[in-house]
Amino acid sequence: MSRNSIAFWLGAIIFLAVTLTMTQLVRNEYPFFAGYVILQFVVLSVAWTILGGYAGYVNFGTNAFFGAGVYTAVFLAQAYEAPLGVQIAVAAVVGSLLGLGVGLMTLRMRGIFFSIATIALAIIVETTVTNWRFVGGAAGIQLQRPPVMAPFDSYVKMLFFVQALLVVASVAITRGIQNSWIGRGLHALRDDELAAECTGVPTLRLKLVACVISGALIAAGGAPAAMYLQYADPGSAFNLTTSVSVLAMALIGGTSHWIGPVIGAILLGTTQQLLAVTISSEINVLVLGIMLVLFVVGAPKGIIGLVRRSKPHGERA
Amino acid sequence: MPEPLLRVESLTKSFGGFVALDNISIDIRKGERFGLIGPNGSGKTTLVNCISGALRPSRGTVSLGGEDLTSLPPNVRARRGIARSFQIPRPFRSMTVLENLMVALDFAAGRGVLESAAHRRDAAMSILTRIGLAPKAGSLATALTQVDLRKMELARALAMGPKLLISDEAMAGLSHSEVDEVLDLLMSLGGEDIAIIMIEHIMQAVMRFSERVMCLDAGKIIAIGAPAEVMANARVQEAYLGV
């Protein structure tokens, strides 16, 4: 293992230890309730970056994958009373299959055409779920949480830690891609798809791989949301604001390195949580929009672009 | 004549009603230096695109070493040994010069050959040294001058370990001494059994470089043979030189 990898895994272990200790020591549930959402957005925007950042294929259908994860969990809970771990694992499988299907249908399109196709996909998936009675249809569905498992004393705290595990998993996978030949191939095709093809990069296959992994992680990140809210309805599970938030977080953080979406999600996610408490949850979208405009104009490569400006070829870790 | 390296058979490409290439057949042998000339719009780049796979021909076949490549995508052809540079350089802009070569080594050259990343890095550096770009290995591709960009495209193509290299006007816009530099480099590759198709407008370079020259006009072959013969051909002079 390189020195970078050792530092990374050490950081991951410390992060998990701290989150676990917090769930044992902090009594108040609210920090976990808010923290869960922030961690969830870290998972989503890191996963989004694999396709949207590395490959440059801007996916507006994050909500389709997210909602697919939510409803996979709902279905498994309703039909089999499946435990949380199974819900997440199956959601990942469903997300990857959805990614494969979407990829096969849309990845031959480029630029804005691909983005529009992903929006269409989200609408199709949402319509399907809206008409599926077993999971509540348009009216939504109430869910019963099973008893919480030791060592946790509340379900929200447990979900918070589960989401922390998903953060580590998704960051590790994304980092692995970035540092491997897959990442190099994705960067190459983002820069110039024809030149990449002619240099031997199997562009369609790599885009499919990116779409499958990204879809699996987004769906996995969405799965615990069903139990978190104890309620699911198509309108909120497939909310387009999820897509826009994830995209904004990734772009504001910067998409050339996995740390970008992590920073973006923590920054914007925390801001949103603070605003939701102090002003109203409606103001979120406005703040999101303003920040996105400011960054697109002032720092098109995001926060990591600003940091890197002083040292143009920083190490890729 | 032994089995040719590249065989193009009755290749036709039309865009709607416009026939860009009309029934082209050529054989290129291993290590051959082949010059491709013709006026603008005569179909040179279309032919290159059909060979490298960027375009699918309307009719006809392309095969390399006896294997039919006609229905294969460019990335597979690249791994089979067809490398090209572009008329307008197409570097990977977010990457350094070294990383540009690493793409070729990671994907086209076959990871089996150069197992570790460190080996591939060494291979990339030795190609850069040979081409005279080693001092720029760490620079971003966007920071290169025109001549360096052209050299980098050739280096990237070489990193693929090709059997056939197609150089599409690699010397356009270069000064006299730079043309000689790139030409010497291309000449030295023939000695390594890499066949080269060179598209060029600089006649001097074509004459010095080529063992055979082919002239296209309006999608048809109007002459093929030894450079001097082709240049003496009345139709070539009429079509190409406007004499």
Image (spheres, coloured by chain):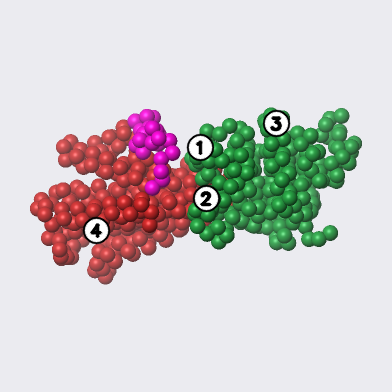
Chain colours: A red, B green
Eyeballing the image, is B25 above or below B132? below
The answer, for residue B206, to whether it is visible in the render is yes
Residue type indicated by callout 3: Ser
Q: CA distance from mark 3 to mark 1?
A: 24 Å
Q: The numbered mark 1 sits on a residue in which chain?
A: B
Do discs 3 and 1 belong to a common subunit? yes
Q: CA distance from mark 1 to mark 2?
A: 15 Å
The residue lying at 19 percent from left, 47 percent from top is: A34
Is residue A301 a member of the stretch shown in magenta? yes
Sequence-first tag of 2 and 3: 2
Where are the magenta residues, as a range? A294-317
Q: Which mark is residue B177?
A: 3
Question: What residue does disc 4 label?
Answer: A162
Front residue of A213/A20: it is A20
Do discs 2 and 3 belong to a common subunit? yes
Secondary structure found at label 1: loop
Front residue of A188/A66: it is A188
Asked if residue A194 lies left or right of residue A41, the reply is: right
Question: What residue does disc 1 label?
Answer: B139
Residue B85 lies, in percent from the top left, at 64, 43
As drawn, the residue found furthest toward the bottom would be A80
Residue type indicated by callout 2: Arg
Crowding at mark 3 (Cα within 10 Å: few <14, some 14-19, many 20+) = few
Asked if residue A18 lies left or right of residue B182, the reply is: left
Do discs 4 and 2 belong to a common subunit? no
Quadrant for the N terminus of chain B in the image: bottom right
Secondary structure found at label 4: helix
Residue A227 lies, in percent from the top left, at 22, 58
Is residue A305 a member of the stretch shown in magenta? yes
The quarter of the picture where residue B229 lies is top right
Asked if residue B69 lies left or right of residue A315, the reply is: right
Q: CA distance from mark 4 to mark 1?
A: 43 Å
